[in-house]
Image: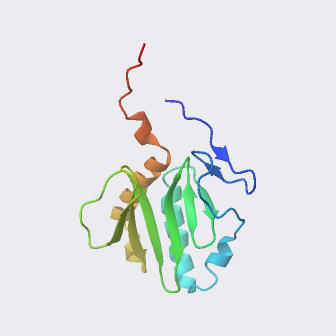
Amino acid sequence: MKTPPLWTCPQCGAGFVSAHMSHSCGRFREADLFARTEPRVVALFDRFRRMVQACGPVVAIPQKTRLVFMVRMRFAAVYPRRTSFRVGLVLARRLPAHSRIEKVEHFGPHSIVHSISIAAAGDLDATLQRWVREAYDRGCQKHLSNRPRRPSVP
């Protein structure tokens, strides 16, 4: 299935899957997001970034309070804290209950954000990598190619 081109905000140049999506419309720096974090948190984030990049091509976009990872759509967000960071992964399904999932939010019927805190190297494990891979596929919009096509009406 061919996907349409991204809409580009004429003011900030950010790309979106549909026109006029809400965003902060500014230019921000990754260094500013992590300015108040402990150095070990930056090292953990670098490892997390490599987990995301292992899935395939990705763009990292610093925003006012977070850094998002995007392919066609944003699929992961990182919210830095002083001693940890929170990751929000956009999935099409709700994951089974897991002690590492702190919060689950629904944004429409097929966008479910799972929040996970990363505070130690052990948090960056194979389970998280599977979840990141699933979110990456969502960011590629692979879920659209799996949908049954509606019959055309004559």
Q: Residue furthest top?
A: 154
Q: Is residue 121 left or right of residue 17?
A: left
- Toward the viewer: 17 or 141? 17
Q: Residue at x 43, y 54 (%)?
A: 135
Q: Whole-percent x and y of residue 99?
A: 27, 73
Q: Residue furthest front?
A: 154
- Toward the viewer: 67 or 104? 104
Residue 2, placed above or below residue 9? above
Q: Whole-percent x and y of residue 7?
A: 65, 44
Q: Whole-percent x and y of residue 28?
A: 70, 69
Residue 47, placed above or below residue 69? below
Residue 89 in which image quadrant: bottom left
Q: Residue at x 52, y 82 (%)?
A: 81
Q: Residue furthest left?
A: 97
- Toward the viewer: 35 or 130? 35
Colour treatment of the image = rainbow
Q: Residue at x 43, y 76 (%)?
A: 118
Q: Is residue 113 left or right of residue 11?
A: left
Q: Residue at x 70, y 51 (%)?
A: 9
Q: Whole-percent x and y of residue 142?
A: 44, 41
Residue 15, placed above or below residue 100? above
Number of dots carrying numbers: 0
Q: Quadrant of the C terminus?
A: top left
- Toward the viewer: 154 or 12? 154
Residue 30 in which image quadrant: bottom right
Residue 125 in which image quadrant: bottom left
